[in-house]
Image (spheres, grey):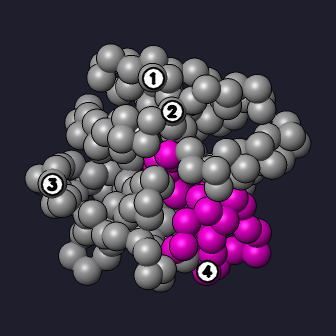
Amino acid sequence: MTIGVLAVQGDVREHVSVLDRLGTETRRVLRPEHLEGLSGIVFPGGESTAMWRLIDHGGLAGSLSEALRGGLPALGTCAGMILLAREITNWHERYLEIMDIAVERNASGRQVDSFERVISCDGLGTLPAVFIRAPYVRRLGAGVKVLGSMGDLPVLVREGNWLAASFHPELTGDTRVHGYFLDMCRKER
Ligand code: GLN
């Protein structure tokens, strides 16, 4: 099983390293042909506006969208969640519009307001979660399940084969969110 990591910008190395530790083969995705034969794809944290420019100019947007709509499992973290969301409440652009959620960009505050919390997730127990200019989920579609929350706020959500986190599981050394995603990918195969 090979998992792609969108490699235009952001926490690419960090995601590859978690997947390595879980014994999974990875491929950096920069061009449409890199999507061939993948069992899943990760959209890293970083800067969604910059990532989108590069995805769009690189001619990757159409093939990504097609692969995801065709059922390719995806994990989006932070900026990756924004790329997957159907709606961004405080931004004029729309990106892949895959998951039926509305998110508010930079809702957790500025870079200097970054924080870490322990959150509890269905089936995963409690885990450390790092928030850096994080998107907060403001609307959940009917088919979207909340797997983890911080108080009343959903921070780990799943819709079918797509999983999105407001936080950065790639930054804490805890592999459980990636492990859960790999299980999803295995089931889909
Ligand atoms: N604020 C960033 C964005 O809008 C996301 C931040 C992150 O991924 N840590 O893309």
Q: Amino acid at mark 4?
A: Thr
Q: Amino acid at mark 1?
A: Met
Callout 3 crowding tier (Cα within 10 Å): few <14, some 14–19, many ≥20: few
Q: Is residue 141 magenta?
A: no
Check if mark 2's residue and mark 1's residue have beta carbons within 8 Å: yes
| Pointer 3 or 4: first along the chain | 4
The mark lying in front, picked from 2 and 3, is 2
Q: Is residue 44 left or right of residue 15?
A: right
Separation (CA) of disc 2 from disc 3: 22 Å
State the SS at label 4: loop
Query: Residue 1 has which mark?
Result: 1
State the SS at label 3: loop
The percent coordinates of residue 135 (x first, y second) are: 49, 66
Q: Amino acid at mark 3?
A: Gly
Separation (CA) of disc 1 from disc 4: 36 Å
Q: Which residue is mark 2?
A: 39
Q: Amino acid at mark 2?
A: Ser
| Pointer 1 or 4: first along the chain | 1
Label 3 CB sits under 8 Å from any ligand 1 atom: no
Location of residue 136 with respect to 180 vertically, above or below? below
Residue nearest the viewer, comparing 42 with 8: 42
